[in-house]
Structures are given as structure tokens and as C-alpha cells.
Image (cartoon, rainbow, N blue to C red):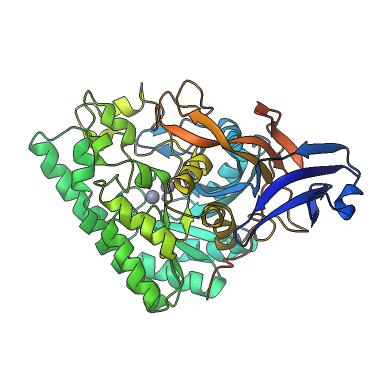
Amino acid sequence: MSRTVIRGGLVVTAAEETPADVLIEDGKVAALAAPGGEWSQGWTADRTIDATGRYVIPGGVDGHTHMEMPFGGTFASDTFETGTRAAAWGGTTTIVDFAVQTVGHALREGLDAWHLKAHGNCAIDYGFHMILSDVNESTLKEMDLLVGEGVTSFKLFMAYPGVFYSDDGQILRAMQRASGNGGLIMMHAENGIAIDVLVEQALAEGRTDPRYHGEVRKALLESEATHRAIQLARVAGAPLYVVHVSAQEAVAELTRARDLGLDVFGETCPQYLFLSTDNLAEPDFEGAKYVCSTPLRPVEHQAALWRGLRTNDLQVVSTDHCPFCFTGQKELGRGDFSKIPNGMPGVEHRMDLLHQAVVDGHISRRRWIEIACATPARMFGLYPRKGTIAPGADADIVVYDPRARQTLSAGTHHMNVDYSAYEGKQITGQVETVLSRGVPVIDQREYTGRAGHGQFLIRDTCQYLG
Ligand code: DUC
Ligand code: ZN
Ligand code: ZN
């Protein structure tokens, strides 16, 4: 039996903060005990980690990534190997990535393809959601099978007509199916039909720079779609999880639904909390680095997102990690913003940026762990195996130095992308050591993981209802 003890740290979970020693046996948390007390002094171990002056926190759970995603005529630049290694560097020990159904093909084909991409390549554990691009009788039946295999959530798009788009009837049918089989519908809520009209008009008028990507994808078209998705979910009697919420008007729709007691949930991402349309307007096509959908919003929207996170009208912060290199990928859209591949890198920086939010006073330490670890684990059926530090949980643990200082930069990050969306940003706090099921993957800021350590996670249905 292998045993590790982490001594002297402040254990922070969503529920509490306690100075405690942590005993790990065979990849699982075995016990927590008062630091230096008689009981924990008696623990023998193969390895002791000194966490004095450090936080001992659950590994991050990033519920929204797109490794190797085909999009906009190219592929997201992180593979499962490079992307999960970068995640580990940033203290994330679980990702839930989106397997993609191609129109005209079975869900099974898409899911198999994602298993092939990920299997043997991941440094940390991973699960899958399924993107439904084509809701029909046969894919509706397949949803039931996938829920049985631990793929318990399904993303639908109200945007991207001709690619991933589902109409209201398809959405309603998928929601009805999910209400019967326990699946969770995740919604990309933007009115893509209206957006495409505005895109065409902008391009015809010569408005081709990256900043127009933000202008045509209007906040009102996000809130309209959010409202419609909520009503459809009510009609179907299904819970709803709205991904990458960026507009304050969309937060208001979620708040209203939650005030009615509905099982409606919202996720936002660090880019919406820390970046804005000012970035999209950067000159010399640099704004392309920040093109993602939903788009970045004017800086005033950030306050509504932080408030939503504090009031639990927003429950989760994921990254929507979908990186494209500036050279050769983002550049596909020079002279036509609609050809810029949509997506931003971020899987490595979520835990640090949210710790910075603790330092800045936006959220508490426990709320940091709740929105980044515990709630995504519950939302996606992984709790308490992931998302907490408690006897029986997987020993996915981060030793975090809250006083270290770092500067985010493409020169030092580990994601396979040639720019940083946060170039030069100073952060207080840094990951020191990361265990995945008790195995060090980052050890005192050295990478000690290996491709293939990460295992596929068969997920339960949503544990956050009611
Ligand atoms: N939004 C992005 O920015 N990228 C991938 C897909 C999406 O919905
Ligand atoms: Zn989306
Ligand atoms: Zn996404």
C-alpha cells in the first residue's frame, strides 16, 4: 500500500477551512486530522509533503474544455496530451471535454472518436459531455445509452446555423428526453439566426475587424436565447445549465428563473470576468486573440457576473478552453471577423485567476473552491469522488502557495498556443504540488506526470438538483 501525508497546511473545501494533516492511501483520501496531533503523528508514509503556510485544496474540476476540437476550418491547438498537462500545471485535475456529433452521423461515432483522441494521452482524469448537432429520433434514443455509459450531459447550440444549430423543436425534444433519462442539457444560448443577419450586414458595410465580432453578437441576443431556453426547459420539465454566460442581461434571466425556484444553472468563464471588449478592439488584428462566443462584453458586465457568482445565480466557473494560435489560425479571419476561429486558451489559469479574485475581494476562499471544484463535480455527477477533500475521495489535491507571485505569459505557460490572453498579468498565488489520485503530476513546480495516467470518468447524473 502506498501512503502519502500532507502536513501543516490549511485545508480549504467548499464547506470549511481547517488546519489539518491529510493521509492518502492508495490514491484515496484516508483521513484528516488535527495538525501535529497524536493521531496524525502516528501516521507513517512513503512520502511526506510539508504544506506549512500553504493551502491544501481539491484539484480543480474544469467542466468545459475543447481539446482538438474541429472548428472554423481548423482544430483547437491543444491535444488531450498538451491540454491536460497544462491543466495539471494550473492545479486542475479533472476536465470534462465535449465530444462532437457530426451532422448525419451517430452520437456513438462522435463519442468513439473522442475516446480515441483521449485514451492513453491524458495526464489527469477526464469525462465527456456530448454535443448534439443533429437531434432526431435515432439520436434521441442514443442519449439514453450515453447516460448509461457515464456521458450524462448534452450540449445544444442556439447559435451557429448550419454547423451545430438546433431549432426550438429539436431543443424541446432533447429536453424532454433528458427529463426522462436524467441527462443535463447544457445550452449555448445566443440567437444565431439573428446574429448571422447582423454578421452579413456588418461585412457588407466593410466592418470586418475583430471588434465587430463582439458588436454583432449582441447581449440582447444572448439574453433572448437564455430566456427562450429557460421557457423550453420549463415546458419539458428538465433542468438547464447555460454555458459561458457573459451578458448582465443573461444573468438577469437566470436570476429570475432561480427566484421562481427552477433548476436553472449558469456558468461563466475567467475571460468574461477579467477581459472585455477593450481587448477585442486591440489594433493590428490583435483583437482576434479574444474572439470567442459568447463574446467578451463591455467592462460594466463584469460586476454583474461577480455578483452572480456571489449570490449563486451563477454556480460554476469553467474555461471553455478552445485555443487557436494567432499565427496561422486566428489569422484565417484577417479581413473577415466571421472567419476567425472562435475560442480562447485558459485551462491553465482558471484556479490562479480565481485565487486572484479572492485576493481582490470578489469572492471568499471557500467560494473559490465551490465554483471551481465542488459545484462542477456535483453538477456533472463526480461528487464526492472529485471536488472535495474527504475520506473516500480521490486524492486529487493541490498544495497552493497563496503568497507566491507570478506573471502570466505565453513565454512561460504550458498550453500549446502562441499567445496568452493574460500576457503580463500579475497574480498572487501559485500551484506548488499537484496529486492526481495520490500520484504527483506536479512536484514542487516540476512536471512529473505522464500521458496515460488520466482515466476516463464514468459520471453519475447531475447531483445539484433541487
Ligand atoms: N464558443 C467558442 O468560443 N469556441 C468553441 C465553441 C463555442 O461555443
Ligand atoms: Zn458554446
Ligand atoms: Zn465551449
Q: Is 357 or 305 nearer to us in this picture?
A: 357
Residue 106 seen in render: no
The quarter of the picture where the N terminus appears is top right
Residue 329 vertical placement versus 464 (above, below) = above
Q: Position of residue 109 (x, y in %)?
A: 55, 48
In the image, taking residue 45 as reference, residue 262 lies left or right, namely: left
The quarter holding residue 225 reads bottom left
Q: Position of residue 62 (x, y in %)?
A: 54, 48
In the image, taking residue 430 as reference, residue 265 lies left or right, namely: left
Q: Is 360 or 330 nearer to us in this picture?
A: 360
Residue 58 vertical placement versus 235 (above, below) = above
The total of numbered circles placed on residues is: 0
Residue 11 seen in render: yes
Q: Position of residue 445 (x, y in %)?
A: 65, 28
* Residue at the left extreme of this rendering: 205
Q: Is 426 or 416 nearer to us in this picture?
A: 426
In the image, taking residue 278 as reference, residue 251 lies left or right, namely: right
Q: Quadrant of ligand 1?
A: top left
The quarter holding residue 274 reads top left
Q: Residue at x 22, y 23 (%)?
A: 284
Q: Residue at x 88, y 55 (%)?
A: 39
Q: Position of residue 128 (x, y in %)?
A: 57, 51
Q: Residue at x 21, y 37 (%)?
A: 211
Residue 342 vertical placement versus 161 (above, below) = above
